[in-house]
Amino acid sequence: MRSRTHLMIGFLAFLAYGYLIHIINKSAVVPWIFGLVAVVVGSVMPDILEPAITRRHRGMCHSRGALILMVFLFGVTALTTIVSLFFAHLPEFYSASCFFLGYLFHLLADSLTPAGLPR
């Protein structure tokens, strides 16, 4: 899959995540620009770590184990972000959750290709 496709998918996931944060706490001031940068970096990071030199470039960073790890890391940082919106704003957790969101959707998109994700 091309990097611009990963960027578009990551951006759409970012919009949905931002909307969810807005619904949960309308008074929160979320540094969306940091989240946008983080989701862009996360959306292309697997291909930076494992460049597509050959058709079979998918290794550990494109694996099902990495997918499970990203689901866990996104879940933890997203829950921390949501809880922190009620107490004190923590832009670091928001940015981290956006990074993991971008990485997660990169892997989900790659899993739908004919090559899929390796174990």
Image (spheres, rainbow, N blue to C red):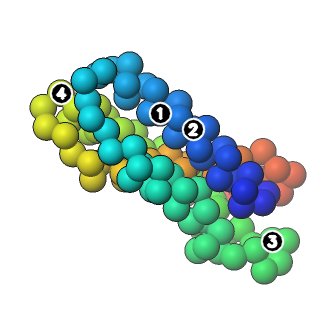
Mark 4 vs mark 1, CA separation in Å: 17 Å
Residue at 43% from the left image edge and 25% from the top image edge: 20
Towards the viewer: 114 or 9: 9
Residue 69: x percent and y percent? Answer: 47, 52
Residue type at mark 3?
Arg
Per the image, the residue denoted by label 3 is: 56
Q: Quadrant of the N terminus?
A: bottom right
Q: In the figure, 96 relative to 24: above or below? A: below
On screen, residue 17 versus residue 23, left or right, reads right
Which of pointers 2 and 3 lies earlier in the amino acid sequence? 2
Q: Is the C-beta separation of discs 4 and 1 under 8 Å?
A: no
Q: Nearer the viewer, mark 3 or mark 4?
A: 4
User: Disc 3 vs disc 1: which is toward the camera?
Assistant: 1
Q: Earlier in the sequence, mark 3 or mark 1?
A: 1
- Kindly identify the residue that appears in the image at 27 percent across and 35 percent down: 29
State the count of labels.
4
| Residue 7 can be seen, yes or no | yes
* Horizontal arrangement in the rendering, residue 13 relative to residue 27 (left or right): right
Name the kind of residue labelled 2 in the image.
Ala
> Mark 3 or 4 closer to N-term?
3
Q: Secondary structure at mark 4?
A: helix
Pointer 1 and pointer 2: residues touching (CB < 8 Å)?
Answer: yes
Please, what secondary structure does the residue beneath circle 1 have? helix
Residue sitting at the far left? 87
Q: Position of residue 108 (x, y in %)?
A: 66, 45
Residue 86 numbered mark, or none: 4
Give the amino acid at mark 4. Answer: Phe
* Residue nearer the viewer, 92 or 63: 92
Query: Real-space Cα distance between discs 2 and 3?
Result: 27 Å
Provide the residue designation for mark 1.
17
Residue 13 tag number:
2
Within-10-Å neighbours for mark 3: few <14, some 14–19, many 20+: few
